[in-house]
Image (spheres, rainbow, N blue to C red):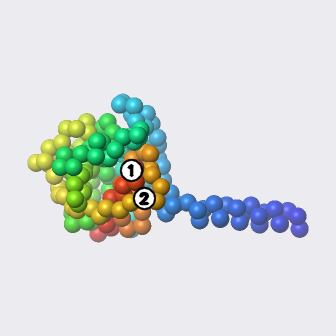
């Protein structure tokens, strides 16, 4: 009886802890975390979006008391991460906002402003600041929001049916689905 009660208690603790986690934490699989060449940690995360497996590889810079406007100025294309360009890989076609994305490997940039734009770029493997507009697959507007508690590190996550960027108190979101 005591063993059954302890087992039941342990199961309840695990179940309760799981419910407290954000949806992104439940859906994402962190494949690896490595130090970046410029000092920010780099993460490889994997998500299931419908039948598609989506992998995002990006540097995660810290706010360090700075403002979003300083780190990602309005009107200037931002690498959306740190160091090397942020990579998105998908094994199936996706729809990201208004952009049809065939299966393959792409680079994600953003254009801060009102609204922010997510840029899906066909050039890959470059340093984050080596952006070529001629290589854009497309751009789509994002929806702005505010986080309840600040995110010290830049985070890119698939939350429900959205691709989201969290940093400071800023949240930018765009719909994502498998085609």
Residue 161, relative to residue 24: is it above or below?
below
Would residue 121 appear left or right of 152 to someone viewing this image?
left
Would residue 102 appear left or right of 91 to someone viewing this image?
left
Residue behind mark 2 = 147
Q: Residue at x 19, y 46 (%)?
A: 76
Residue behind mark 1 = 167
Report whether residue 51 is seen: no
Q: Which element carries disc 2, helix, strand or loop?
A: strand
Report whether residue 157 is seen: yes
Q: Where's residue 28, x and y in %?
A: 47, 56
Q: Where's residue 151, x and y in %?
A: 44, 50
Crowdedness near tag 1: few (<14), some (14–19) or many (≥20) residues, C-alpha within 10 Å: many
Q: Residue at x 44, y 45 (%)?
A: 152
Residue 22, relative to residue 135: is it above or below?
below
Which is nearer the eye, 58 or 143?
Answer: 143
Which is nearer the eye, 48 or 169?
Answer: 169
């Amino acid at each position: 009886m005591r063993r059954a009660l302890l087992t039941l208690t342990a199961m309840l603790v695990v179940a309760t802890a799981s419910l407290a986690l954000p949806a992104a934490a439940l859906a994402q699989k962190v494949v690896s975390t490595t130090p970046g060449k410029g000092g920010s940690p780099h993460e490889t995360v994997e998500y299931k979006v419908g039948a598609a497996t989506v992998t995002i590889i990006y540097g995660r810079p810290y706010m360090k008391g700075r403002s979003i406007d300083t780190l990602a100025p309005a009107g200037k294309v931002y690498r959306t991460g740190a160091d090397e360009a942020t990579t998105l890989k998908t094994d199936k076609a996706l729809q990201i906002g208004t952009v049809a994305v065939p299966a393959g490997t792409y680079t994600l940039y953003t254009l801060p402003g009102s609204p922010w734009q997510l840029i899906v770029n066909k050039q890959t493997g470059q340093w984050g600041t080596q952006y070529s507009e001629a290589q854009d697959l497309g751009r789509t507007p994002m929806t702005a929001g505010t986080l309840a508690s600040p995110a010290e590190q830049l985070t890119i996550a698939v939350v429900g049916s959205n691709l989201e960027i969290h940093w400071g108190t800023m949240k930018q979101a765009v719909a994502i689905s498998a085609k």
